[in-house]
């Protein structure tokens, strides 16, 4: 069965701006005039934010919103330790990696110690996750001599020219590259390893040598598909047997998001060839990068000059180092596991009594909750949008994901505790009760 066309989820309809309060309508008009139409806003009624602290965001009227969505400020909005480290470094020095500085070396050493690579590893730094994936592709193609890449059917891996063409979730107006093959997302009834083997064979039939298989370790854009832990291990063997590299995209799953492991690939017992990192790395500051074994990087390092003006700059490295400090000292991994388990179990009980909610899946503080049409049992993007916007009306922020936009995406900052989970669950229950029909 063919996959449905990817859809835009949780987007603001600009034609309804006149229905908003005058101040919001005016700001939206100015925004569109200044930034253009390619930018998108969340929610039927966008939120104007002015401040963040911990797991809460605050609008221009001072109202608080429980943030159950943003993983970029992974250790909490405006964390004081991160803020102080950034301010101190910014007041001291900010330059680039062509000068010798101790901070980026110490951070790389700390970061590499958390990874499980095949032998000693090395790190390279960028500003964004898209750049990190782009760099990983360059390395993989040089190492293997191939160009073919395999991704899942609704994957998202970035917005550069190279990464957009292997991000089917961006929709039909962003065509995939001729060297890209997609496989169905891992789900019941799908032989995932066999699908990857078929894609490898199809590339070969068209004269395309495999460079890499690339996967978000939680399959976030495909609908949050984390289980069973370990199912990706045979895929890595299949890919390597065909001469390709396994690239673990940890932009979503990394930095203890799953609660049990620092990196999502470690849940699957995989030793990846390249790991890409981003989003939560600097708690909101632009730092991202890759980690790979020295063997994989050796030829690239010998023959290719790489420089990123802002990648790995001292201020962003200070933020990233402070994030590791907080993860190590404030018990956030244990909280992600405990609160995530509580939230998943409680949401499952709520779903069991609701005709609208289906399967609840998750690992740590990353949950996907299916939304279904009670009349047909089919996934419903419209009902999911109604839930997302209903919760926004109660000042709890989530979003949706999946090829139909029918999966509630719950991905809060890691300090999200049991009391916040209870607030989330109470609001979700109220919103479900208020749905028409």
Image (cartoon, grey):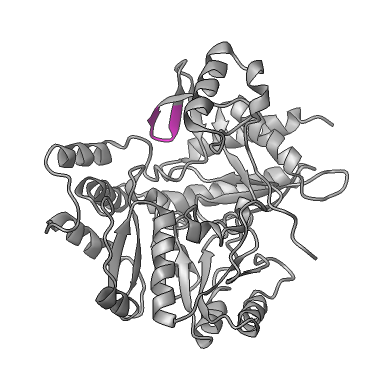
Tell me which residue sits at (26%, 60%) in the image: 307
Q: Image quarter for residue 390?
A: top right
**Extent of the magenta region:** 51-57
What kind of secondary structure does the magenta stretch mostly adopt?
A: strand
The relative height of residue 389 versus residue 323 in the rendered view (above or below) is above
Is residue 430 shown in magenta? no
Furthest residue toward bottom: 241
> Where does residue 302 sit, x and y in percent of width and height?
25, 77
Tell me which residue sits at (46%, 70%) in the image: 247
> Where does residue 94 sit, x and y in percent of width and height?
17, 45
Tell me which residue sits at (71%, 34%) in the image: 386
Is residue 272 at least partly visible in the picture? no
Of the pair 314 and 70, the residue shown nearer to us = 314
Of the pair 404 and 159, the residue shown nearer to us = 159
Of the pair 152 and 350, the residue shown nearer to us = 152
> Where does residue 44 sit, x and y in percent of width and height?
64, 28
Give the quadrant of the C terminus. Answer: top right
The mark tally for this picture is 0
From the viewer's perspective, tell me whether residue 263 is left or right of residue 395.
Answer: left
Furthest residue toward right: 375
From the viewer's perspective, tell me whether residue 251 is left or right of residue 84.
Answer: right
Give the quadrant of the N terminus. Answer: bottom right
> Where does residue 387 sit, x and y in percent of width and height?
68, 35
The relative height of residue 46 versus residue 310 in the rendered view (above or below) is above
Furthest residue toward top: 22
Is residue 115 at least partly visible in the picture? yes
Q: Image quarter for residue 148?
A: bottom right
Is residue 52 shown in magenta? yes
């Amino acid at each position: 069965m063919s996959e449905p066309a990817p859809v835009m989820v949780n987007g603001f309809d600009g034609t309804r701006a006149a229905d908003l309060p005058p101040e919001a309508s005016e700001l939206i008009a100015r925004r569109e005039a200044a930034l253009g139409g390619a930018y998108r806003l969340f929610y039927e009624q966008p939120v104007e934010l002015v401040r963040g602290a911990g797991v809460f965001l605050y609008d221009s009227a001072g109202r608080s919103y429980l943030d159950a969505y943003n993983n970029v400020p992974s250790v909490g909005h405006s964390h004081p330790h991160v803020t102080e480290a950034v301010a101190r470094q910014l007041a001291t020095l900010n330059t680039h990696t062509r000068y010798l500085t101790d901070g980026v070396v110490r951070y790389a050493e700390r970061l590499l110690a958390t990874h499980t690579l095949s032998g000693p590893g090395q790190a390279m730094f960028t500003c964004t996750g898209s750049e990190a994936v782009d760099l990983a592709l360059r390395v993989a193609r040089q190492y293997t001599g191939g160009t073919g890449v395999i991704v899942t059917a609704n994957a998202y891996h970035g917005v550069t020219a190279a990464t957009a063409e292997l991000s089917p979730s961006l929709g039909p107006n962003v065509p995939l590259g001729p060297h890209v093959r997609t496989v169905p997302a891992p789900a019941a009834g799908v032989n995932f390893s066999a699908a990857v083997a078929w894609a490898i064979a199809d590339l070969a039939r068209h004269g395309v040598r495999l460079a890499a298989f690339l996967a978000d370790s939680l399959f976030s854009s495909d609908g949050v598909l984390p289980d069973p832990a370990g199912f990706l291990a045979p895929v890595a063997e299949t890919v390597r047997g065909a001469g390709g590299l396994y690239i673990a995209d940890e932009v979503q799953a990394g930095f203890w998001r799953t609660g049990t492991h620092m990196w999502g690939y470690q849940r699957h017992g995989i030793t990846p060839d390249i790991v890409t990192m981003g989003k939560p790395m600097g708690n909101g500051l632009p730092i991202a990068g890759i980690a790979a074994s020295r063997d994989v990087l050796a030829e690239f390092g010998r023959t290719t000059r790489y420089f990123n003006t802002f990648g790995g700059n001292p201020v962003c490295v200070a933020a990233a180092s402070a994030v590791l400090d907080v993860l190590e000292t404030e018990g956030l991994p244990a909280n992600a596991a405990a609160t995530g388990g509580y939230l998943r179990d409680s949401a499952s009980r709520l779903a069991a009594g609701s005709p609208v909610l289906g399967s609840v899946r998750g690992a740590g503080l990353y949950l996907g909750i299916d939304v279904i049409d009670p009349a047909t049992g089919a996934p419903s993007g419209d009902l999911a949008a109604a839930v997302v916007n209903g919760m926004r009306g109660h000042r709890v922020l989530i979003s949706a994901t999946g090829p139909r936009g029918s999966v509630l995406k719950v991905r809060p900052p890691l300090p999200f505790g049991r009391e916040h989970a209870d607030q989330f669950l109470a609001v979700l229950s109220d919103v479900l009760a208020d749905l028409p029909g």
